[in-house]
Amino acid sequence: MRVVFMGTPAFAVSVLRRLVEDHWDVVAAYTQPDKPKNRGMKLIPTPVKEYAMTQNIPVYQPASCRDEAVWEELRALEPDVILVAAYGKLLPQELLDIPRTAMLNVHSSLLPQYRGAAPINWAILNGDQETGVTIQYMASELDAGDILLTRKTAIDPQEDASQLYDRLAELGGEAASEALSLLERGKAPREPQVYGPQYQYASMLSREMSPLRWEKPAEALVNQIRGLIPWPCATTDVAGVRWKVFRAHAGESTGEAPGTVLSADQRGISVACGDGRALVITELQADGGRRMAAADYLRGHPLGR
């Protein structure tokens, strides 16, 4: 089968790499245009472009996918399947109709749960114990297409969104390759999604989600910290200093008011929460500083109770 791949970030690279390793005929890779970065505003290629070039896969970077010329270009590639993984653009129906066999998307949740932009983060923010990836047939409505297959994985209680992102990228590659095999053999299932009020939409993250509210339970704050890595990160102000918080765990019981600093030593910085337990911060970054263990931070910035 002739496969056209569409993706942009590191997540997509893991999927594309698996297709290459499994010897699928990837005839082209579509990715976002190069973007200027840093002080020199040098154009930086996307991760997918960088990897595709190492594999001699032709790269296309249209500014828009709503152009007749782009559709004609795609038709000329004669794809049996177009596979999308975190491409970053909404695709019109005219493009969805191009492949001869299927237009597929790799989505990092167990659909219909967590349709939307940030499914990995919301699974952790909500304290879920399990998530996974879905290979779906693409439809005009976002993440609403029929399901071809799903693959599940447990979420470790200390795993943050960045770590889970990496694992789901690998799982997504495995699932995508399996989906292509099912299509090639004519055995690919197709299960419609039934979306209801029991499912949550995975809305985009924002900086307004960052501040830790000490009246919340300690475990909820742990999930907030894990779920907002690498951006926008959980934040708090203690003793007049603003920190990003990268690692914490629920600690001992306490009768102190929420927000009270209970201790600050080699074990970390312990703060009272709304459920009568402490949150122990073990890794942080002060404004203008670098990310470090809380114990190391305290050597130069001791806190009084």
Image: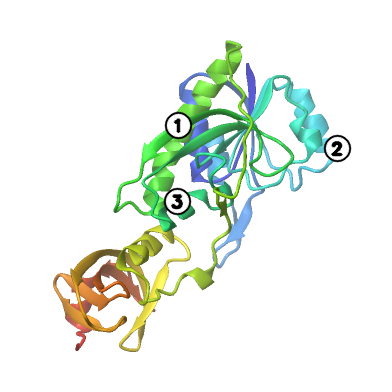
Which residue is at 72% across, 43% downward? 141
Residue 98 appears at what percent x and percent y? Answer: 77, 27
| Separation (CA) of disc 2 from disc 1 | 36 Å
Estimate the x, y position of residue 91 in percent, counting from the top left. Answer: 73, 41
Q: Nearer the viewer, mark 2 or mark 1?
A: 1
In the rendered view, would you say 288 is above or below 160? Answer: below
Furthest residue to the top?
185
Answer yes or no: is residue 120 visible: yes
Residue 56 can be seen in this image: no
On screen, residue 254 versus residue 46, left or right, reads left
Residue at 17% from the left image edge and 80% from the top image edge: 263
Residue 251, image quadrant: bottom left
In the image, which disc is placed on residue 151? Answer: 1
Q: Quadrant of residue 75?
A: top right
Q: Tell me the kind of residue under disc 1.
A: Arg
Q: Earlier in the sequence, mark 2 or mark 3?
A: 2
Circle 2 — which element?
A: helix
The residue beneath circle 2 is 68
Kind of residue sitting beneath label 2: Glu
Residue located beneath label 3 in the image: 123
Q: Quadrant of the N terminus?
A: top right
**Residue in front for this viewpoint, 296 or 163:** 163
